[in-house]
Image (spheres, rainbow, N blue to C red):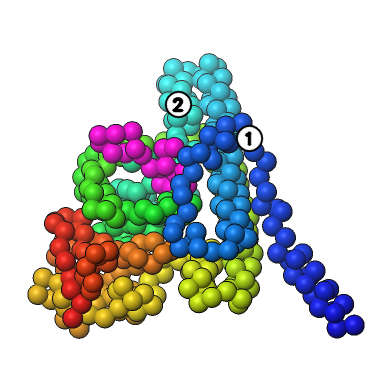
Amino acid sequence: MLSLLTASVADAADDLFDFSDLDIVDSPGSENEKETAPPEDELQKALPESIRTVLGKLERFSAAKRKSLLKEIAAGRKVAAEILVAKATKTDAVTRAALLSEAKRVESLPPELPLVEAAGASSAPASALAMLMGTWKNSTSKWANTFAADGTFTHYNGKPGYWRWLDEKRGLIVWDYTPRMQYADLVQFDLKSNPPTARRLGDDGGLWILEKTASAGIPAGKQGKPSEPVTKLATHEAATRKELETLIKSKNAKVAAWLLQQAKSLPAPQVRVIVERASELEGKAGNSGTATGSPNFAGVWVWSGKKLEFAEGGIVKVNQKNAGKWIWAKAVPKSLIAFVLDTGDTAAFAKPSKSKEGVLYILPVNGKKSEARRE
């Protein structure tokens, strides 16, 4: 009787964590995408194959759904543009020019960006969000990222990623590519430059100048109000985006719960990786937390004659006084911190040296690389 009860509980667990809903049917060209997919990070490689398989399915599912939505949005915008052009043939010269201009904007706007900014959205020219939303590229290459207000971005090659604020008032963000890429960037936008520019700092210390090449949709209710077809399409797009993100969040939560259940039977080093990955899926990744959870950053560091500490709650202390804020630049592994000080012009990465014990490298957006040594 006991064995039957145990078996029924196990069957129920299998039903609860059935991940067949994450299966994606390969589409033409998918083999090429698999060949160029970024590698897993080293910590995730150490996990059991069953866990890596589920995580891989989840990431492919999310990426495929987002890519499919972008194609759907682009197709809808092409139809809307054709409607506007058709309308333009039946009106006066002034209205015709406005409709043709709107048709061009609708069809050429990157599908990651909204046709019309939501009412009440931050749209003042000096706002950091208005500055960020749009497409940014390196001035010397084809590299480009297109940022959306929901905390996501799309790389020019179609790969997705996430961004979050380090300091909105200073126009500072950190972005992280997915799936499981080793790289993160710290970017500072010049909120006063015209045309808009930014400085992009890689976690390897590389620095690039970015230029904005495309902006988000026009603000709702502002001069140049979009025509009815565009307004309806924008409303439909917003609802569809929200529906997809709700779906992806539900899948993330399901996998996170399964990961935490699997962690009960795994060794401590793997448990730490799984718990961090589950937190990331639950939307808790990137929260400042405490750096004492990572021995690489715990304690007090002597840096340029000052005592630097990454304290509880995302607080940076200098000489034991609150002096700024920090966040994890990558959710997994926790081996990179982005921080900003309240005074001066300091926004930087902090990363442990791989060859020097008790040394942190400080990589600033403005300035030269330096070392901090554990007190």
Residue with the most extreme left position:
305
In the rendered structure, find residue 46 and report the number of the disc placed on it.
Answer: none
Q: Secondary structure at mark 2?
A: helix
Q: The disc labelled 1 sits on which kind of residue?
A: Ser
What residue is drawn where x is 23% and y is 61%?
348
Task: Give above or below for 332 relative to 141.
Answer: below
In the image, taking residue 52 as reference, residue 362 lies left or right, namely left
Is residue 145 magenta-colored? yes
What residue is drawn where x is 42% and y is 52%?
181
Is residue 86 magenta-colored? no
For the C terminus, the quadrant is bottom left
Query: Mark 2 or 1, which is nearer the eye?
Result: 1
Q: Are marks 2 and 1 in contact (CB under 8 Å)?
A: no
What residue is drawn where x is 39% and y is 75%?
289
Q: Name the residue beneath numbered marker 1.
A: 27
Label 2, label 1: how far apart the Cα atoms are: 30 Å
How far across and down, in percent of the image, does residue 225 sit? Answer: 45, 38
Task: Give above or below for 28 relative to 216.
Answer: above
Task: Give above or below for 269 relative to 60.
Answer: below
Q: Name the residue beneath numbered marker 2.
A: 104
How far across and down, in percent of the image, does residue 45 sit? Answer: 50, 59
Looking at the image, can residue 145 be seen?
A: yes
Query: Magenta residues, as a range?
Result: 137-160
What residue is drawn where x is 57% and y is 35%?
31
Q: The disc labelled 2 sits on which kind of residue?
A: Lys
In the image, taking residue 124 as reference, residue 258 lies left or right, namely right
Q: Secondary structure at mark 1?
A: loop
